[in-house]
Image: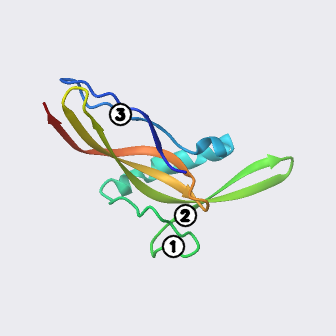
Amino acid sequence: MSLRVLAWQPEPGQPLPIPLLADDSDQFPIEAVKQVRAWLAQSAPEFHDAPPTATVVTLSRPAPGVRKADVQYSVGEGVRETLLFRHSTMEILLKNSKYGTITAKFRYLVARDESNRVILGPMLRAIQEERVN
């Protein structure tokens, strides 16, 4: 499970479009997703220049300095569950050849849980844009 690109259609002479992405947020309660996205938005400035996180994440032995978020949500009357998330950065390389080759890298801040499911956070930046006609 991870981010999936649903659409990206750059046009010559137009600003580089933001890709349409899907994540695993439909596998979590809505309340948990809202809390995680708020946490990611608040954390985004700290990760602006961070390199992409390794694809394999071991939550049982996190690297020094890695912060985690415990998200509690109600699953029934008086019953609460806790999900554990950690920050991760993901880089997506996209290439479109419809009007010549247009290549761009986008970096996002995401949250991963123990099962490596991803909730999409804010885009940190477009890293590279190359247009060859």
The residue depicted at 18 percent of the width and 23 percent of the height is 13
User: Where is mark 3, residue-wise?
Assistant: 18
User: Given the current orientation, which residue lies at the most extreme right position?
Assistant: 77
On the picture, is 120 further left or further right than 76?
Answer: left
Residue 26 location (% of width, % of height): 63, 41
Question: In this rendering, is residue 43 above or below 21?
Answer: below
Q: Give residue 12's quadrant in the image.
A: top left
User: Identity of the amino acid at label 1?
Assistant: Pro
User: Disc 2 and disc 1: Cα gap in Å?
Assistant: 9 Å
User: Disc 2 and disc 3: Cα gap in Å?
Assistant: 28 Å
User: Identity of the amino acid at label 2?
Assistant: Lys
Asked whether the beta carbons under mark 2 and mark 1 sit within 8 Å of each other, the answer is yes
On the picture, is 41 further left or further right than 82?
Answer: left
The residue depicted at 85 percent of the width and 51 percent of the height is 78
Mark 2: secondary structure: strand
Question: In this rendering, is residue 109 above or below 51?
Answer: above
N-terminal of the two: label 2 or label 3? 3
Any mark on residue 68, and which? 2
The residue depicted at 47 percent of the width and 69 percent of the height is 66
User: Where is mark 1, residue-wise?
Assistant: 62
